[in-house]
Amino acid sequence: QSGMPIRLSKRMSELGMCSRREATEILRRASECVDERMLRTLDEVIYLRGKPVMGGSAVKIPPEEMHIEIRAGDDPPDENEEPEDFEFVPYAKRPWNEIQADTIVLKKPIGYVSGQEEHDHVPAVRLLTKDNIALDHVDDEEQQYLIGEDSPFRFDVWKFAGFDTVAKSIPRHIRKKIPEDQLKEKRANLETLSGYAPAGRLDIDSTGVLIFTKAGVMARRLIEPKSGIRKEYIVKVQPAVQPTHIERKLGLKNLPRPTRDLKVLFRRGNRLLNERISLKPLVEAEWLDDVTMRFVMVEGKKRQIRRMCRELLGWHVVDLLRTSVGPVRVDSLPEGKWRPLTQEEVTAIFETQPKHPKKSKSRRKSSPASNLNGSN
């Protein structure tokens, strides 16, 4: 019902200020303070129309409330300020120079992991250097701003060991695809972009769009399935001959014969080997030629496309490219290069209409008596 009060934490989540859990935690800490003097010791305090909120997570507000702030406890709003002076501005509507450098996109090459450095695998963040930035899409003045002395980008020195070409943890088929000069490369004091985390993941043997951001609201928008952000993949395949050693250990005796019928990918209830949760149906799936498929999905699991092709279609993936995440594409971006998102891309990401799951309605079976009375 329109106009009914909602929880403050829910409203803050809707506005993209923080998650409901984060807001609840901030409210909990404030509720434990006896007076406003104790509030000054907190790192974060929520202010509603200039007043600190100390009533806990049960506080409710009008659903259209916009006068909400998160500030440090020792930096309360000025008493002379009007509520309009601190009206919350949604992330996508903030001045472009404030958020221009918050999110970047990398065209990840093969051989890099999207997460942290582990098991001798090199993280993709290693590629986020000054030399690898591509600014062909902006004018000269903006280029000077982004790479000049007042650049919004900050680079820190990280020490990487480089690729270990002997380690068994790097699959042989991946090592073969890595250029020889890159394998021998040892960068001891490499300056890489600081403060950014990957919004999603991309396997070590996959290439394409990998987005990094330092804005929590952007990360949630890109990662949460209910945001409705679509991801597109181009996949090259060959017939799968027989189950791998790991598949056999998990109980898979035979793979299906290779099929060109993709209808199974749109069905509900598909499950991969040894997985309890069923897959979400794909949005789009089609053959582009004899060995190339195109998939579009909103929500995907770890290595889903590779396993789905083997276990449901009988095809083995030999090459996987993520061509887009929502409006963000890297068609003209060379592998290993990165660039900041454009204003149009950021706006389009937040204009995508979230998808709310529909509640399933239980169907009552009609009794024989009701059928006799003409009920359907």
Image (cartoon, grey):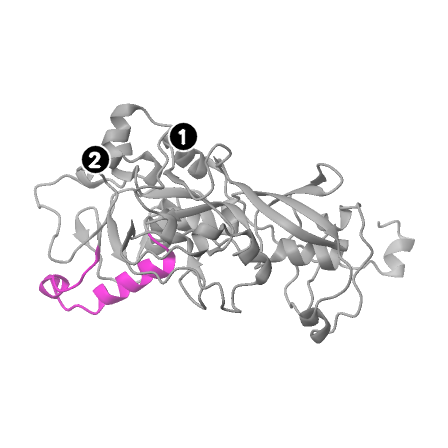
Look at discs 2 and 1 and give the one toward the viewer: 2
**Circle 2: element type:** loop
Using the image as rendered, state which of residue 328 and residue 124 is in the foreground: 124
Using the image as rendered, state which of residue 49 and residue 258 is in the foreground: 258
Looking at marks 2 and 1 on the same chain, the residue that comes earlier in the sequence is marked by 2
Residue span colored magenta = 18-45
The amino acid marked with disc number 1 is: Glu
Q: Residues within 10 Å of mark 2 (few under 14, many from 20)?
A: few
* Residue 74, horizontal then vertical, whole percent: 11, 57
In the drawing, what numbered circle is on residue 344? 1
Residue in the picture at 27% in, 41% down: 88
* Residue 258, horizontal then vertical, whole percent: 80, 52
Query: Can the viewer see residue 95 in this picture?
Result: no
Determine which residue is flagged by label 2.
148
Residue in the picture at 38% in, 32% down: 342
Using the image as rendered, state which of residue 325 and residue 44 is in the foreground: 325
Residue in the picture at 44% in, 50% down: 181
Q: Is residue 108 left or right of residue 357?
A: left
